[in-house]
Amino acid sequence: MSDLVTGDAVVLGLRPARVPSRALAIVLDLVVYIVGYVILSIGLTFATASLDDAAQAAVGVAGFVLLLVGVPIAVETLSHGRSLGKLACGLRVVRDDGGPIRFRHALVRGSMGVVELIMTFGAVACIASLVSARGRRLGDVFAGTLVIRERVPGARVMPVPPPPPWLAGRFSGLDLSAVPDGLWLAIRQYLTRMNQLDPQVGAAMAARLADDLVSRTGAPPPVGVPAAAFLMAVVHERQSRDAARAFAPVPAHGSGAGAAPVSAAAPAPVPTPYVTHAPVTPAPVGPVAPAAPSGPPRAGGFAPPA
């Protein structure tokens, strides 16, 4: 990854493209351009059949320069650095600060590409890319550009292991609203990688995360429940609540999407005499009290086994 720093002191994490992917993109572009040049040459041959040999040669050279130099410059300018080959390989040409390129960048790259790619059959470009720390050829150096990878393979998301069956539904009364997202993320990362950790280190991390979770929920630590199993059960309970909230049926307010509410068509209530009475103070609604543990609460928190 390339740590590029912009003028606002922002570090850009960009992945520069290497020689194999760039070479494949250039080959695909050249194949398309050569096929287009052959078709254009055939069309110009029939169109300039009445001209002399010098005129036909001049038209052929102009078509060659236009197709192999002008067309790539126009394509990179209009597509902001994504030619057909780069699009197929998941690459893009950007400026050194990560912004989209303009016509002058594409002009410099295309002009230098004639020397690097066509006249030397890509030897100069290959050597320059291998020497450069970010895989840039001479056209990128002079133009101030960089070829980056847009399609980066994402990391595989490991599922959280299920809790023991005897813990199913035991923590349904916990108040999880005060648990921050950072703690949930730390617990999930631990549960997905706990089999790769040292047993003592993993037990210490589970105890610390369980103590943090207990302090956030306000409930005493359950007696006889290992820290890792407690974390699994609470994460499973949160996932169950999220799934129930996401797939809960929405009450319908009418037969159609634009139907009026039922209350709008309801008859007017019959007026009743006003009765003065003391106002009724509604009972305060608070969070549901957590379920009491099955045994007496432990004085301390979770502690890793010796």
Image: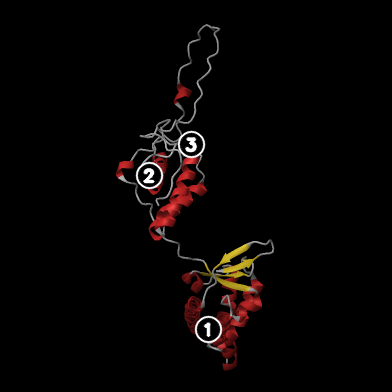
Closer to the N terminus: mark 2 or mark 3?
Answer: 3
Is residue 62 visible from the viewing direction of this image?
no
Callout 3: SS: loop
Tell which of 21 and 54 is nearer to you: 21
Residue hosting label 2: 233
Mark 1 nearby-residue class (10 Å; few <14, some 14–19, many ≥20): some
**Could you say where residue 162 lies in the image, as x and y percent from the top left?**
34, 49
Closer to the N terminus: mark 1 or mark 3?
Answer: 1
Mark 1 in CB contact with mark 2 (< 8 angstroms): no
Task: Report the amino acid beneath label 1.
Answer: Leu
Mark 2 nearby-residue class (10 Å; few <14, some 14–19, many ≥20): many
**Could you say where residue 74 lies in the image, as x and y percent from the top left?**
59, 73
Residue depicted at 46% across the width and 52% down the height: 205
Considering only vertical position in the picture, is 235 above or below 90? above
User: For the image shown, how many numbered marks are present on the structure?
Assistant: 3
Q: Which of the labelled discs sits on residue 218, or is there none?
A: 3
Mark 3 nearby-residue class (10 Å; few <14, some 14–19, many ≥20): some
Tell which of 276 and 34 is nearer to you: 276
Taking the image as shown, residue 254 lies to the left or right of residue 143, namely left
Callout 1: SS: helix
- Eye-nearest disc, 1 or 3: 3
Considering only vertical position in the picture, is 198 above or below 121? above
Mark 1 in CB contact with mark 3 (< 8 angstroms): no
Residue hosting label 1: 44
Task: Report the amino acid beneath label 2.
Answer: Ala
Closer to the N terminus: mark 1 or mark 2?
Answer: 1
Is residue 13 visible from the viewing direction of this image?
yes
Instruction: Point out the residue furthest to the right here.
Output: 7
Tell which of 13 and 25 is nearer to you: 13
Residue depicted at 45% across the width and 54% down the height: 189
